[in-house]
Structures are given as C-alpha cells and as structure tokens.
Image (cartoon, rainbow, N blue to C red):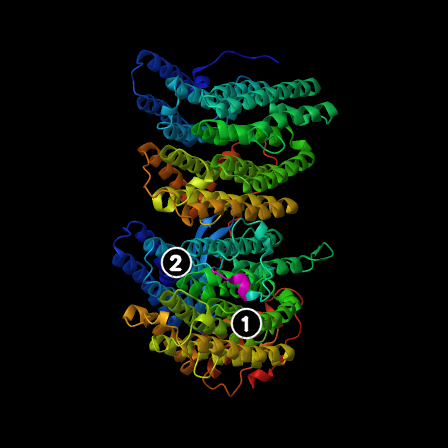
Amino acid sequence: MTFSFTMSPSDLLLLLPEILLTVWLCLILIVDFSFPRLPNEQLAYFSIAGLVATLGCLVWFDVAGITGTLFANMFALDRMALFFKMFIVGSTILVILVSVDYIHRFKFFRGEYYFLVVMSALGMMFMASANDLLSVFVALEFSTLGFYVLVAYLRDDMGSNEASIKFFILGIFAAALLAYGISLVYGETGKLVFSDMKTAQASPGLAIGFLLIFAALGFKIGSVPFHSWIPDTYHGSPTPVTAFLSIAPKGAAFAILLRMFLVALVTFKPIWTLLLVAASILSMTYGNIVAIAQKNMKRLLAYSGIAQIGNVLIGLATGTKMGSDAMLFYLLTYLFANLGAFAIVIAVSEAIGSEEIDDYSGLGRRSPFLAFSMLIFLLSLAGVPPLAGFIGKLYIFIAAIKEGLYVLITVGLINIVISMYYYLIVVKKMYVSEPHDRSPLKVSGPIKVVVYICLAGTLAIGIYPQPVTDWVVSAIMMFSNVTDPTASLPSSPAVIPFGG
Amino acid sequence: MGDLTLLYILFAPFAGAIALIFVSNRQTMLVRGIAAGSAFVSLLASLYLFYAYDHVKGGFQFVQQFEWSRQLGISLHLGVDGIGTPLVLASSILLFAGIFVSWHIKDRTKEFYIWLLILAAATIGVFMSLDLFFLFFFYEMSVIPMYLLLGMWGSHTKTYNEMTDPEGLKLRDSVRFIFNFGSNSKEYAAMKLVLFLSAFAVAALMGILLIYKYSGLNTFDILVLREQAKLMNIPVLGTTLDKIIWILIFFGFASIAPLWPLHSWSPVGHAAAPAATSMLHAGVLMKLGHFSIIRVAFEILPETTRELMPIAAVLCMFSIVYGGFVAYYAKDTKYVIGYSSSSHMGYVFLGMAALDYISLTGAVMYMFAHAMATAMLFAMAGWVYDQTHTRDIPSLGGLSNRMPFISGCFVVGCMASIGVPGTVNFIAEVMIIVGSWNKYPLQVIVAVVGIVLTLAYLFKMMRGLFYGPMDQKYSHAHDAVSLPDRLPLLIMITVTIGFFFFPMHLYNVVRSGVDPLIAKITRVVPVASQEHEPLGENREARAHASPQDLAALPGDVSPLTPYMSRSDQ
C-alpha cells in the first residue's frame, strides 16, 4: 500500500472543517493561557463561536455537495460523514452551553475543560470520516483520550474518580481488542480500507477479527454485553460530560459501524444480522428492565440510553438503506430528547443540588417550564406521538418489518411498554407528588437556550418529519456501496380521488 | 366552512391548548374563556359537519389530504363517513360540556384545560383519520393526557378493596407488588390505564405494520389498502396471515372498548378520573376501540371479519353480564357508572358481531347515545362528589332536597342509560336487539337481561344518592344553579331527547356509512323496503349502486343474492 502525500488545495478544502476546528482548538488554549482572568463564560462562547463556524462550513459542504476521499481512501467525506459531523458538532455546541453554569464546580483547569471537549469533538469528526481500519483506530483513541480526562474532572469526588478508572480500564481494554481485531483482519485480507474488503473470503480469523472490532465499537455505543461501564461512568461523571458521552461518541461509532457492516462485510449480511439482532434484543430488554429499579436520574437515563441504542441497532440489523436512514433519523431524535433531558438534570441539580428521582417531586409546581420540558423529552424517549421519538421508532420498525425481522419488532414493541413505566414514574414524581419544598427554581439563560432548542427539535421533527427524512435519505444516498439501493426508493403513495 | 370543516374541528382544540400556554394561571376567567371558545368553535364546526354530511351520496366526505412523509407513505388524510360523523359530533359536544363541568377546578386550571383539549382533539383525530398511521398516532396521543389528568386532578378510591371483596381478601390487583404504590390510589389507576392501553396498542401497531408489509403498497392509506391490499390466504404459523392481523387489530383496539376480559383498567380509571375526564373517557374514548375495529378490521379485512367476528359475539355476553352484576354490588358511584359503561359497550359489540345492516347501525347510534347518557351520569356523580366529598353510596342519601335540579337530571340520565322510550338510547337498543336476533338469539336474551340489570343498579344508585334520609353533614351541599353549571347537563339532555324525536338524520347518516361496509362483508345487498318511505329514494339509489361496487371487490365473488332480513321488514 502506498500513501500519496501530495495534497492539492482542493484536497485541503475537504479537510477544511477539521482544519478550522484544529486552529480554533489552539486558539482556545492560547486565549486561556494568555488571559487567565478571562471569565469562563467568555471562553465558552469563544469555543462555541468556533464550533458554529465549523457547523456553518459543514452545512455549506452539504448544500454545495462537496464530497470526496483523501489519503488513498482513508478519509472519506461523503454526505453520511457530513451528517455525523454536523450531529457531533451540534451536540458539542449544546453540551458547552449546558456546561457554562456547571463549570464552577470544577476547582482547577476550567479553561482546559472547553479545550478537551472540543478536542474530543475533533476526534469524533475524524471517526465519522474514517474509512479504513487504521484511521478508525487513531480517530477513536484520539476522541477517547479527551473523555478519559473529562470524566475525572470532579477531582475531589470519589464517584467521578471511580467513573474515570472504570471508563479508562475498560476503554483501554476495548482499544486493545480493536487493535487485535484489526491485526487479524489485516492478516486475513491484506486490506485496511473498508471498500476493498468486499471480496474477502470467510475464514475464522476474519470472523474473530470483526467480532473483536464489533466488541470495541459496542463498548463505544454501550450495547449489551459491552455496557458494564455505562451506569457508573454516567453516574460519576460531571453531568455535561455524561450528556456528551451519551450522544456524540455513539453517533461517531455508528458511522463506523455503518461503514463496516454495509460496506466491508456486505457479503456476510445473513451472519451479522443475527449478531446485531441478538445485541439489539439484549440491549433493549436489559436496559429497560434495569431502568425500572433506578433511583437516580442519571442512572435512569444511562439505562434508558442502553435501551435506546438497542432500538438503533434494529436499524443496523436490517442492513438496508431504509434501515440506515431510520438509524440516522432515530439518532437525531435521540440527540434532542436526551440532551434536553440532561440539560434539565443539570438545571435541577444546580438549583436543588440533587439528581435523585425522589427530589423531582413537585417539579411541576416549582418550575412548570422545566417539568413540562422534561415531560416532553421523556415521552419522546418513550416514543409517544406527536413527538420525534415516536416517528423515529416507527421509522425503524417499518424498515425492520420490510426485512421480516418479526421477533425483533415484537421485542421492540413490548419494550416500548416497559419503558413507558419508568418514564412515567418520573412524570408522576414531577406532577403528582407534592414538593418537599415549594420555592420556585431558577433556570439560567444558557440552559434555557438548550432546552428551547431541544424542545423545538423534538416537537418539529415529531409534527412534520419530512425535511429531516429527506435529509437522512440523501445522506445515505451518497454513501457509496449500500447493499440495496432500491430498498426504500419510495413509490409515491397513490392518491385516490374520493368523494367526488 | 366547507371543505376545511374537519381541520377546524380537529385543530381548534389544539390551537386553544397552545394559546393557553401563554396565559397566566391567575387569569382564571381568561383561561376558561379560551378553553370554552376553542371547544365552541369545534362544536359549531362539527354541528355543521353533521348536518352538511350528504347521506345520499355516502362515502367519505370533507376529505383533506396532505402529504406528510414520502418515504414512509404517510399522508394526513382526513375524512368522515357516516360512522365517523356522529362520533365526531359526540366528542365535540362532550368536550364543550366537559369544560363547563370542570368550571370549578382551582388547582392548575390552565394545565387541566390544556390536557383536556389535547385529549379531546386526539380523540376527534382518530374519528376522522383515513390513514392507519394517523389513526394510531391520534389513538396513542389520547392515552398520555389521561395519565396526567388522572394523576394530577383525580381522586383516590379509599376503600376499593373492601368494597369489592366482602371478606376483606385483597385478591384484586395482585400486580401491586410490581407497582410500588397502593392499588386504590389514583396513581395506580393512571399507570394501569396507560400501561394496559399501550400494551394492547402496540399489538394493534404490529397488526398495522403487518398490513403495511404484506400489502406491499408502501402506504398506510386506508382507502388504498381496502381496495388493493391482498392479505388473504397467506399461510403463517399454521394459520393464515389475515387471521393473525385481525386478531392483533381486534384485541389491540378492543382493550380500550373495553371488551371483557380486557376491561380491568377501565372502572379503576373512571373512578380515579376527574368528572370531565370520566365523561370524555366513557363517552368517546371507549368508542375509539369499536371505531378503530370498524375502520381497520372491517374495512381492510372484510372476509376475515365475517369469519372471526363470532369471537366478539361470545365475549360480549360476558361483558354485559359481568359488568351488570359488578355494577349492582359496587358501592362507589363512579364504579357503578364505570361498570355500567363497560357492560353497555357489550351491546355495541353485539351489534357489530351480528354484521347486519340494522344491528350495526344500531351499534353506531348506541355509541352516540351512550356517550351522552354516560357522560351525563358522570357529570352528576362528579357534582355530588364535589359537594359531599364522598362517592360511597351507603353514606349518602336524601340529596334531592338539597339539589333538586341535579336529582331531576339524574333521573333523565338513568332513563337514558336504561334506554327508556323518549331517549335516543331506546331506538339504538331496539335496533341492536332486532338486528341481531336472527343470528344471535342467545346474546339478545342476555342483552335484555342486561337491560333489566341496568334498571336495577341505576335505580338502586338513584335511591341511594337522592332519596331516603339525609345525613346532616351534607346540609351544606349546593344544587347546580348558575348557567355554567347547568349548561352541560341541559345540552346533553337536549341531545338525548331531541334525537329520539328526530332520529332520521342520525339514522340516515349512520346507515350511509354502514351500508357499503356490511355489503362488502356479507356480500349481500340490502333491498329497499317499501315501508321505509322517507328512505325509499336514497336506499334505492344505493341499492342500484351496490352491485357495481361489489363486482369490483377482489377475491372470489359469491353470487349476489337478493336478501331481505327480517329486521328490514
């Protein structure tokens, strides 16, 4: 394999968002060191400015249709990569906004916090474009590096330290599995780029290699049986970091999973469908059943996240274009609902200093705005119309029923009912139980902004999903080598003139 | 109005709910005004709809279609036929009445009206959906407001266990160990309702998804599916696919109806709910079940319906008798009315099961009539509860001195519920009984026993509440004197009695919806009877149109036999 390092300006253009963010990353560090007395909010807004510029650049790419590959196919910038990059940058912006008020809990290195968050985002942007196993490894470790530090940011808090150790040890273990898997796959096929592996012959080494890679990525998305770090790490981390962990790395890892399963392993579809069906059923059922017993809001959201990932895996298990569309759609609805819910957890914990579900008693009286927003986000996670989560679930189920995955859909539908129970327990606490203390809660500006954005997203996608469906459909359309491009090319529904 | 009528009916309550978000809770009159105003717009539009519906033409009218999702084949396709029209009217009447019934709610008034409006609008949405997706969308959307309405403004049932089990054995609600709150609390009732209905709703959703897949048409549109979907004779798991779909759809939707043995959420829910919610719940929410079965199972799977509908005929007997007996022994006013509702819903299932022109028309009319009658009873039970803070019948009594207007209306409500001549319920009941006699004589006998039971428990409750000696602690109880308090009852009584004396328009509208459906299911064309003079013209027109419609049906067409049912004579 030869690498060409001659880069033309047009090649550089493809890297523009990453370059822009790298420059900004250095600027954040320089500004933080040069102006030690700069208030933290200023630095937060400074980081957001860079991220917004990057987002603008990505939107421009998407609208102008700028796509291509670099470095002998190692770096692919197709519309799916653009979707996931926007997903990651968007969630990073929201996470920084919810961090603005949380940051005072950190005793040291407040400035570096933003640096680390943006750095992880940069790593995940590379993950979204990683088109061969080496760049997958590098980008994945690059993004995880930032998280190892972020999780441990509450230095004096035992929980945060425990979370970090757990995350670090299991993360390193997953990295080792990934490296070993890559070496096996390379040994068997002699190829690293996903699209070159399509012709690979089945062999035990290849199977074990891909299983190991799947395990490492399963660790990132937190699907059962690779979920064991999730509850403790989510619980112990600073809440904005938990929110970040619960969204962005999952999106980036799904980008890799899509490329791996639908491009590299497309010939082995019947085999990996079984694997994904099993992972999906286990994730949904385990996540939902264990969530019932939770007393802490962050743990509840952690287990609900495991279950939600099970839902996304249904889309992957279909292995069709429509399933992939549905996955992207679902991840977007999950972004708004989950980040919104975490924003409220932060707002409540800022006001009353607790994250226990019991302390949400009477939130409907103390802060109708927070309670109503929480209600919307939880119902969207549960999949209740007219909210985004309902459309997302239905989209995935429709994609799955077209492939005839009846067992999976049945389990998914039953899990909707189970999940409704624990989401409604929180609703009951907020609205039915009487508050311990009737004083109204104060909500800070940046958190309000985040909640409004997430509310708007959840309601808008739920009430009129067409623009978003068009977007995800075109995002996957440009993603080369989809197994069955005709699978969801819709025939427009026949409209029967009636009544005349 | 014109073509956009359905949009006004559906979106006026939603608009009201959104407007209420921006109003302060302290401006109580403004809050009530907005709620009542938006409900009034909806009511006016549905009155227009009811009288502008052209029963000669029949079919789906006021059709609106907006593309909603190209990829999934979903469009917001609205339209009403003769079955949906009266139910839309009933929903908006009950919403308007319900807003006045809850006039005195002090706690979080704004939120109450927001959720009530959303509940009613979602219900109305089901009655006008011509798209399976939106039918399910609105159906599921009506469940969550119930949770909040029950949880926030409901009331506990203090002695549920003691009342139902004289030996004090707490055998009921043994699922309590899963739920960490008491089985007689409103939280329990609300959670049970939501989980129960959601669990069965996902079964219905599975049926809908199967229809979507096996029709292969990439659409959820009921009108397209009923013409083109070929779901028959696909072997699956030792039976055929259409049977599996039908069972999923039928039991999925029958849970909200509620058909025995899926009824257990319903009385608990009624008892815990505030008066206006009980009204909507028993009045129209329960009809979502029958309506959705008719709209989905009858329209898309007519052959299977003919084959499997006897299931409903068997289960409806248990509904009628079980509900009636429990209502007789219950000592809580709302339990009596709740069980009476689930007993009366058995008549609707009987009318549907007979698959006869007259009985199905009667069933739909009964849905309309029952909505008014049971809502009236719930409104008055709610008034009595507000005044006395108890629903325990033995501890009440003699209230007619304190509340002559309420007790007078209560008599009318009981009469309507029993189906005494003078109320539209009578017409509907007679049609169900006459229409199903040919096919299910045993069930008709059970239904008549059920009417006697209704008489017994309603008179028992009436005597317990309003006559006999009165406990002095209730001497402060007030009658409904102001207009907002009396208005809802007066509206419902007017509708109940009015449609007894002028039933023809209601009958014609319902019949225009029932005719093509039954013709498709039974493949028997109705013969216009000369005795029905006012109908002659229209019926003849339909009888002429029907053979062509039938010839267009897919599958093996059996010879069209001219047929005259005894009920038609």
Q: Quadrant of the N terminus of chain B?
A: bottom left
Q: Is residue A292 above or below residue A243?
A: below
Callout 1: helix, strand or loop?
helix
In the rendered image, residues at marks 1 and 2 fall on the same chain: yes
Tell which of A37 and A209 is nearer to you: A37
Tell which of B568 and B182 is nearer to you: B182
Q: Quadrant of the C terminus of chain B?
A: bottom right
Tell which of A263 and B435 is nearer to you: B435
Q: Position of residue A52 (x, y in %)?
A: 36, 27
Q: Which residues are magenta?
A: B157-163
* Residue topped by disc 2: B116
Q: Is residue A443 visible?
A: yes
Label 2: chain? B
Q: Amino acid at mark 1?
A: Tyr
Q: Residues within 10 Å of mark 2 (few under 14, many from 20)?
A: many
Q: Is residue B23 above or below residue B455?
A: above
* Residue topped by disc 1: B329
Q: Position of residue B75 (x, y in %)?
A: 47, 53
Q: Is residue A210 above or below residue B551?
A: above
Q: Residue at x 66, y 75 (%)?
A: B559
Callout 2: helix, strand or loop?
helix
